[in-house]
Structure formats: C-alpha cells, structure tokens
Image (cartoon, rainbow, N blue to C red):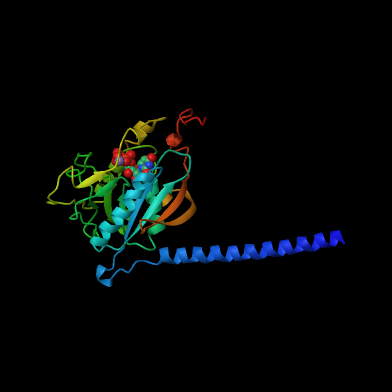
Amino acid sequence: MRTMKRLIGGLLFLLVLSVALSVLLALTSLSSNCLETSIYKREKEPTSWGPHRLAVIVPFRDRFEELLQFVPHIHHFLNKQKVKHTIYIINQVDKLRFNRASLINVGHLLSQKDCDYLAMHDVDLLPLNPKLNYSYPENGPFHIASPEYHPKYHYSTFVGGILLLTKEQFELVNGLSNRYWGWGLEDDEFFARMKEAKLNISRPQNVNSGVHNTFKHLHDRSVRRRDTARLFNQKEETRKRDRLTGLADVKYELVSTQYITIDQAPAVLHNIKLICNYTLTPWCEHKSGNTKKML
Ligand code: UDP
Ligand code: MN
C-alpha cells in the first residue's frame, strides 16, 4: 500500500514538475520573442531619410566601458543627421592577438545584405561636432577622423579612426589586409590600397572646431595598453604593401549573434573567432609566456 502511495505521489510530483517546466518554457520563448521583435523592429525611419543605410562597423574586444558610451552616442548622433544605420559590434572572441582589419572585413561580409555603405569606427572615438557628415560617400572614401581634428594622430596620410566607404569602394580594394595582428599599420596599408585604386579620399573641412573638441577619445593608455609587440618577421612584413590578402580570403567562424540595446540604442553583436594562416602570419599568437597567469 505504502509503495503504491509513494508511486502515485511520485507520479503526481513528476506531472506537476513537467507542467511547471512547460509553462516556464512557454514564458521564456514568449519573452524572447517579444524581445526579438522589439529589437529587430527598426525604429521608424522616415522615407525622407533617403535610400542609403550605413553599417557602423566596430572592431571590438574588451572595451566594455567605451561600448556603453559609444552605442547610445553614435545612435543619437546619426539620428540627428537622419542617417539610417545599423551598429555592428564585431567582437573578437578567439585567443589570438587583436586584428582590427580582419574584423572590419568580417563586419562588411555580415552587413552587406542590409547596408550599402560602411563606417570603420573605433569604439573609443566619439564624434562631437554635429557638422561631421556621415552621409553616403558617393565621391569616394570620406575620412571623418581627419588628422586635422583627431586628438592624437596628425600625419597627412592617416586614415584610421573613422572612415566611410561605399560597399563597392570597399570591395574594389579587396577590403583590408589580414596580416596585421596586434596594434598598428593596417590603416596605413589601407591608405596605399585606396591610392592605388585611384579612389578620391576627402575629409571634413571648416567644421569650426579643433583637435580638442571635434572628437572625444576615450583612451587611457595605462588601462588600455596597445599591443605593439613585433614577433617573428612581423616588422618587415607589415611594412610591405599586401596584394594577397583581404576581404576575399578572411577566415573566421561566427560563434553567435546577440541583439543588444544600450540605453535603448540597438546594436548587433557578432562574436567572431578569427582563423590564422600560420604560414603567412606566424605572429598572430601572443608570445608564449605573455599571457597573464591565473592565480
Ligand atoms: N580595439 C579593441 N580592443 C583592443 C584593441 C583595439 O576593441 O584590445 C578596437 C577599438 O575599437 C579601438 C580600435 O580597435 O578603438 C583602435 O585601437 P586603439 O584604440 O588601441 O588604437 P589608437 O587609435 O588609440 O591608437
Ligand atoms: Mn584609441
């Protein structure tokens, strides 16, 4: 008798548990659907905003505080200019050295269906002057982070920071080189690509502000150290013009995609594992012994 009661009790318990579980599942799928539709659904953008859509491509790793400021700031800045846009955070989640150029190539591939032009955009550089124009650059690449106004870089061939191109212009030069692991020089090589393709690069002019108030650079170098190591023959190799690698051969795995909002500003976050060509770029890994020991 007792065992019978136990059996019935057990069965009842299982029944209640499964009902509770299915209710829970239904609720979570409902809420994730609500979440998805509210994030997927584009804010009302009047047709008067024109036919173009900008992909703001942010190469990213480990700059959470900067991201919290960047996404709402750029979203409002672009809305004020009536620029239709989607923000793509291309988050490098592998254990290799940071590769800004390859992440931008990936950003282009993952946004080309929805957008017809792109901004390569550093996460730590906020445009302050509303005269900085993010509209479709039909006459050639438009370098917003001009050396005339950038807080840190003032050499005349500088094209880093923030650079606008149409998708066609970006494809014409085969995107950026994939050889640049660690900090620097990938933007200078990209300048050479644009020059060789005879693209006409222009920059903002007469915006009535200076190096201190055109942009805000959220970069404390004691906290955000630049990876300036030069491993193997990296130094010689990365000084050369690269006619081999670029958009056409960037190798990566899309691990997952998350739709996020920060202060109600939407962004698409792609988690990316880059795949290194060790024969061509053996310097893609951190120097052994360079990784922090976990205590
Ligand atoms: N970046 C990143 N994590 C890193 C290194 C770079 O997210 O560990 C991205 C970020 O978008 C940053 C950009 O690459 O704004 C350029 O790097 P950094 O700010 O170090 O270069 P700077 O232009 O200040 O010399
Ligand atoms: Mn910086």
Residue drawn at (34%, 66%) of the image = 43
Residue drawn at (46%, 56%) of the image = 258
Residue 87 percent location from the top left of the image: 35, 56
Residue 150 sits above or below residue 119 on the image: above
**Residue nearest the viewer, comparing 199 with 10:** 10
- Ligand 2 - quadrant of the structure image: top left
**Residue nearest the viewer, comparing 251 with 3:** 3
Q: Residue furthest right?
A: 1
Residue 272 percent location from the top left of the image: 46, 49
Q: Residue furthest top?
A: 289
Q: How many marks?
A: 0
**Residue nearest the viewer, comparing 127 with 272:** 127
Residue drawn at (50%, 64%) of the image = 31
Q: Is residue 177 visible?
A: no
Residue 95 sits above or below residue 54 on the image: above
Q: Residue furthest bottom?
A: 47
**Residue nearest the viewer, comparing 25 with 57:** 25
Residue 156 percent location from the top left of the image: 19, 41
Q: Is residue 203 left or right of residue 283?
A: left
Dividing the picture into quarters, in which one does residue 66 lie?
A: top left
Residue 291 percent location from the top left of the image: 47, 31
Q: Is residue 119 visible?
A: yes
Quadrant containing the N terminus in the rendered view: bottom right
Dividing the picture into quarters, in which one does residue 158 lie?
A: top left
Residue drawn at (14%, 48%) of the image = 209
Residue 51 sits above or below residue 238 on the image: below
